[in-house]
Every structure is written in structure tokens, then in C-alpha cells.
Image (tube, grey):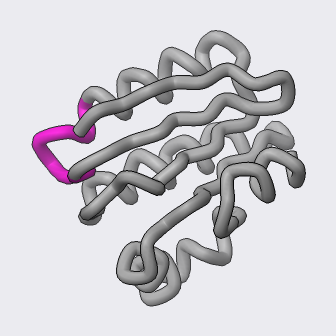
């Protein structure tokens, strides 16, 4: 997994590529904890280049949601491929996270 962090005025984008699975979640989890600890309350996970996500990857997003949502923060996902979008729908996580087809649409909602 390659991870790029982009600071925007109204949110922080975490763009990932390749696979988000058990062998790569620690890097993402560490980065999310660092961002939340630094005061970031709006995280956008950009999955445009992500080919695969498993339950370990989903767990990191849920952890971010659990930490940010009670304090009014927001976690959203954009640009997920159809089969990754389906994982969110089957698991019900599409009800927790804002799901957007483009990064611009997500950023505008923040």
C-alpha cells in the first residue's frame, strides 16, 4: 500500500493505492492516530487507486469514526471502485461513512 496525505482547508485526504489488508493496516492506523492526535477532525479516505480492502482495513476506518464522530468529526470515503463500494454496502458501513463518487464532491460536503 502506498499512502499519501493531503492537507486541505476543510479536511485531510488519505489517498491509498494497491491493497489495504492485514500487512498494510498498521501504517494507516499509525497515520490516522497521528492526524486525530494532532487535531484533525475531518478525514477523507480516497480509494481511487485502491484495489482491495479487507476487514483489517475496514477496522481502521471504524476506529477513526468511533474517535471522531462523538466529537462532531467526520469520516468519509471517495472514489471507491464498485466492488469495494459493495463491501461497504454489504457490511452496512456505507451508513457510517459518507460515500462519494469523486474527491471534489466529498470535499465540498465537508
Q: From where the camera sits, is residue 49 visible?
A: yes
- Above or below 59: residue 2: above
Quarter of the image for the N terminus: give it: top left
Residue 63 placed where, x, y %? 49, 45
Name the residue located 47 percent from the left edge and 39 percent from the top edge. 15
Residue lying farthest to the left in this orientation: 23
Residue visible at 67% across and 49% down?
Answer: 75
Q: Is residue 64 left or right of residue 52?
A: right
Q: Nearer the viewer, residue 107 or 43?
A: 107
Q: Position of residue 39 (x, y in %)?
A: 72, 16
Front in this rendered view, residue 38 or 78: 78
Residue 51, position as x, y percentages in the image: 27, 62
Q: Residue at x 60, y 75 (%)?
A: 94
- The reply to whether the magenta stretch includes residue 9 is no
Q: Quadrant of residue 7?
A: top right
The relative height of residue 14 versus residue 33 in the rendered view (above or below) is below
Q: Residue at (24%, 50%) from the top-left corner?
A: 18
| Count of marks overlaid on the render | 0
Confirm whether residue 99 shows in the render.
no
> Which residue is outermost to the top?
38
Q: Is residue 25 magenta?
A: yes
Residue furthest to the bottom in view is: 90
Which region shows up in magenta?
19-26
Amino acid at each position: 500500500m502506498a499512502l499519501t496525505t493531503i492537507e486541505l482547508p476543510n479536511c485531510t485526504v488519505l489517498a491509498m493505492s494497491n491493497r489495504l489488508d492485514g500487512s498494510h493496516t498498521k501504517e494507516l492506523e499509525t497515520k490516522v492516530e497521528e492526524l486525530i492526535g494532532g487535531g484533525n477532525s475531518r478525514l477523507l479516505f480516497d480509494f481511487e487507486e485502491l484495489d482491495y480492502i479487507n476487514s483489517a482495513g475496514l477496522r481502521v476506518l471504524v476506529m477513526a469514526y468511533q474517535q471522531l464522530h462523538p466529537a462532531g468529526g467526520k469520516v468519509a470515503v471517495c472514489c471507491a471502485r464498485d466492488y469495494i463500494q459493495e463491501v461497504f454496502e454489504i457490511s452496512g458501513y456505507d451508513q457510517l461513512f459518507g460515500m462519494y463518487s469523486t474527491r471534489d464532491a466529498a470535499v465540498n460536503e465537508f
